[in-house]
Structures are given as structure tokens and as C-alpha cells.
Amino acid sequence: IANRGEIACRVIKTCKKMGIQTVAVHSDVDSSAVHVKMADEAVCVGPAPTSKSYLNMDAIMDAIRVTGAQAHFNSSAPLAISAAVEVIAAVNKRHVLTVMDPYIHMCICPFTPRLCQTAEEAVKIAQQIGYPVMIKASAGGGGKGMRIAWNDEETREGFRFSSQEAASSFGDDRLLIEKYIDNPRHIEIQVLADKHGNALWLNERECSIQRRNQKVVEEAPSTFLDPVTRRAMGEQAVQLARAVQYSSAGTVEFLVDSKKNFYFLEMNTRLQVEHPITECITGLDLVEQMIRVAKGYQLQHTQEDIPINGWAIECRVYAEDPYKSFGLPSIGRLSQYQEPLNLDKVRVDSGIQEGSDISIYYDPMISKVGDVLDTKCNHSAPKFICIRSLKEVGASQMTVDKMAVANAHAASFLNWGPRRLGRTNLEQKCAKLTSNNKIMMSCLSRDAAGVIVLQYLGTLFKVRVLSKLAAELNSYMPEKVSEDTSSILRSPMPGTVVAVSVKPGDTVAEGQEICVIEAMKMQNSLTAVKQAKVTGNVTVTPITRFQ
């Protein structure tokens, strides 16, 4: 199994159920990962970067030979438990489909049939299609190597970032350009086909709730589709699978406009992240079906056997900083993690546990939480746990009364010893506001200086609680002088410097790019916050890692 994280754990679970022994491959920083512990054997295939480990096909093949593995599973680059390589090449590169389109009759959104080689060529193609356009990695997925451009300058910049991200994530920097559709719905059809000409569509998943072009919430079935449109999309997806002699589980993705016109987007020849919700409403184990198909068995079901039992939703859980608008990945050791497995009809797919390390090298998605219901209408109460909070209310919105209550509650934490600042500091019932309401306070942190950070209904209260003696002695302590950062550009996260855009002596304008940082497979441009002059030496060069 040449994957890591939750998808590797997911495959291992089905293999154990089927009595199949498994081999996990891992990078050197993943040696203690959950999927490595779950597998029967494990082989290190290289250093942390995916291009040198999980996407290093020579190392993967060496692991197969050494262990004597009879099959190979990799959801991003399948070799055995998936379709044939030549089929993947046909459907995973959409420009190839333009040759086949007269025979498949796919509804395709306007795009260029040729790949872009240079930024200027991308600008020319974008002008021909008409703005806005979407710049995409030909071999891409997961929002990597994807940019929206509204003019020529954004196309040039998008070409640069997309090609670099595509090369880093997929080992293929080729790009294509298509028309960008405003207010679309992203709806995909799960297909399943065998090597005997049988193919099924397993209903749809709606993935329209996205952020930075990456799916974050998915549901099945879609509340937007009617049965006629659902069947039309399903039949077209199956038609494509049969036309290219596809044999495995795959996903045909569409964009659907407000009038329910749908356009082929791409086909993913792998097990999708969001596959659990399809399993929830159909009762099928897609990994088991993929293994059976790879072995040569025929499908066990016909189209009439595929049900829609209830309604399922899945939310992805990310290791990100909520106090920076969830805009930046958050790395480090996972000190507290608890899955809501006690809740009925809740499914959690994860590849982490308490003590796991979240590194800069991989995607920040660490787990998935899913819920299945009889119908969408009876979803009367949320069943997902909130990790701290999804919203933060600014300090300016705190009332005097709430702040007074926070101060009083903070005092109750004063006598806690260090051993008490573990699991017990969350969701403590501290006091009653009225006779009918209880406050649920969370103590997020406490330091030696007496600073305690509490959270109540998403609002942070930062207070300082000292003993009488400490308060008296504190008056003799010098005030710490805040660092002057007005002339400093500081990276908000550890990562790799992939480009430096200035040199000593340059005068930069506000908003001008200074350098580009890559972390967790995404590239981020760091810009100047004011007009200034670059002084001294540029001490960091491209392809330099820092913490």
C-alpha cells in the first residue's frame, strides 16, 4: 500500500477483513505513523518529500520485490489495484479525451486541447477562451496546481505557481486552461467497472463546499439533482468508463450550473478521499470491490441493485490555525485528539492518534468525520465535535459581565498543578450564569507567568491570575519591550524557500512579492507590507528549508 495517512489505514482495514496481509511503505519521518503500525510489514522508501518517497516508483518497485507483494495499491498512482496504466493515461489527461469525444459524447466545458508550455502561451490561450479562466495541472487533483485568472497578469502569475505546485505534488508540471464557470456545483459520479465489460454508477456526491479549490465538505446524494439528471450523469459516466475499458473504482467529476446543465471536468482513476459517504448510502465496500476487480472477478451487483439509503455528509479535519482564518497549516505534535466514536452512525477515517507529528511535508488533512441519516430532514442536531471552535469572536465583542465571569473562572484554575493541565482542562463545568444556564469554559493554556487563556462559546478570554505575593513582586518586574517588526518580513510557518524575488538594494512597493514559501504541498507568496528598501544581504536562497 503506497499511500500514507487515513487512506492507507482505510485500505488496511478492508484487507484485514478479507484475510490479506499488507505491506506499508513510509518515508523516514513517517516511521511511527499509524498506517505503519497497522500493516503486517513496513518498508522505508526514502526521505520526507513525496517525490523522493511515496511518489518514487523505483523505490516502490524495490519494496514490492523485496517483500514479494502480489498486488500494489496507490490511490494517486495505481499500478495493480486499479485500471490499466494506458487507461489511466487516457482519462487522467483530459486533453486526450478531445480525440475520443466524438465517440463518447461527453459534455465538455470550453478549454484548450493543448498543454501550455510557457506563461505567454497561457495568456494567449486565456484570451482566446475569454476571461475568467481556470489554470489547472493536467495530472492534478486536490486543489494543487490550480489558479483562477481574471486578466493577463494573473494568468502569468498563476502559470508560475501552478506549474511549480504541479511539479512538486505530481512530478508533472504540464498545465491546461479552461473556462471558469461562476457559481457552479461540483458533483461527481462514483463508477465501478470490471474486466468483463460490466460497469455501474453508484450515485453521486456533491462537493461544492470548497476552500482554496479543495473539497472540505461532501454529501451524498446531492440535494440539487433530480432523478432524471442523476441518471443522465450516471449513464454518461459509465459510457466513458466503458469507452476506455476502465476496470476498477473511479470517479467522473462534473460541473453543474444553475439550470442543471452539466460539463465533464475530469476522471479520477483512484479511490477518492470522499468515498466513505458513497459506502454509507450504498452499503458497498469500495476497497473490497477494487481488490476483487483487480483479481479478475466479475461485479456482484447490477445497476438495479444500487440503492440510496439515507443521506450522508463528510467533513474533513485539517491541522490548521483557526486564529489565522484557517489560512495556514499548523504543524507540531498532536497533544490531544479524541474521535466521536460513541455517536451512532458516525464514521471516522483517520491516520493519526494522540502523539502523532504533523509535518510540513504533507497535506494538512488529518482525518474525516462522516454522519449518515435516514433522510436529510431529520438532521435535527449536529453530531460533529468542534475542535475548540470554528468561529472566533473578537475581544471587542466581550461584555464587562462576561469578562468578569472569565476572571472569576480563571481564578479557579490557579491552584491546578502541572499534572492537571492535560485532558482535564477541556470542557470544565465551572459555574452557573443563571438558575437555568451553565457556562462551559475551556482552559486552552496557562503559563508560569499566570496568563490563562479561556474559551467560552468561541470567545477567547486572556486573563492573568496571580497570588497576592506574586502580584506584589510583579510590580518590580521590568516590562518586556515588544519587538519592532515594521522592517521585518517573517514567514508565518516553517517551510521551504522556493523563490526569492528581490536582491539587496531593491526598492519594493507595498504588496510586492518578496519570496515564495512551500509548505504542505502549497506555495504561498510573501509580500511587503509597506514600501521599503531591501538592505543587507539576502541570507536565504531558494530551496532552503527552515523551521
Image (tube, rainbow, N blue to C red):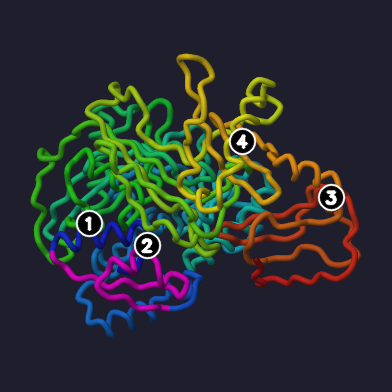
* Contact flag, marks 3 and 1 (Cβ < 8 Å): no
Query: Which numbered dot is residue 477?
Result: 3
Q: Is residue 103 left or right of residue 484?
A: left
Residue type (three-letter) at the residue carrying disc 1: Val
- Magenta residues, as a range? 19-45
**Label 4: how many Cα within 10 Å (few below 14, some 14–19, many 20+):** many
* Figure quadrant of the N terminus: bottom left
**Which label sits on residue 287?**
1
Question: Which of the two discs, 4 and 1, labels the residue nearer the N terminus?
Answer: 1
In primary-sequence order, the first of circles 4 and 2 is 2
**Residue depth check, mark 4 versus mark 1: number of the one nearer the observer:** 4
Residue type, mark 2 in image: Ser
Comes first in the chain, label 3 or label 1: 1
Task: Kindly identify which residue carries mark 4.
Answer: 410
Q: CA distance from mark 4 to mark 3?
A: 22 Å
Q: Earlier in the sequence, mark 3 or mark 2?
A: 2
Q: Is residue 23 magenta?
A: yes
- Does 80 sit left or right of 414 as displayed? left
Q: Earlier in the sequence, mark 4 or mark 3?
A: 4
* Residue placed under numbered mark 2 in the picture: 76
How far is the residue under mark 4 from the one under mark 2? 49 Å
Other residues around mark 2 within 10 Å, as few (<14) / some (14–19) / many (≥20): some
Pointer 2 and pointer 1: residues touching (CB < 8 Å)?
no
Give percent across and percent down for residue 207.
40, 39
Disc 1 on helix, strand or loop? Answer: helix
Q: Amino acid at mark 4?
A: Ala
User: Residues under labels 4 and 1: Cα distance?
Assistant: 50 Å
Q: Secondary structure at mark 4?
A: helix
Q: Nearer the viewer, mark 3 or mark 2?
A: 3
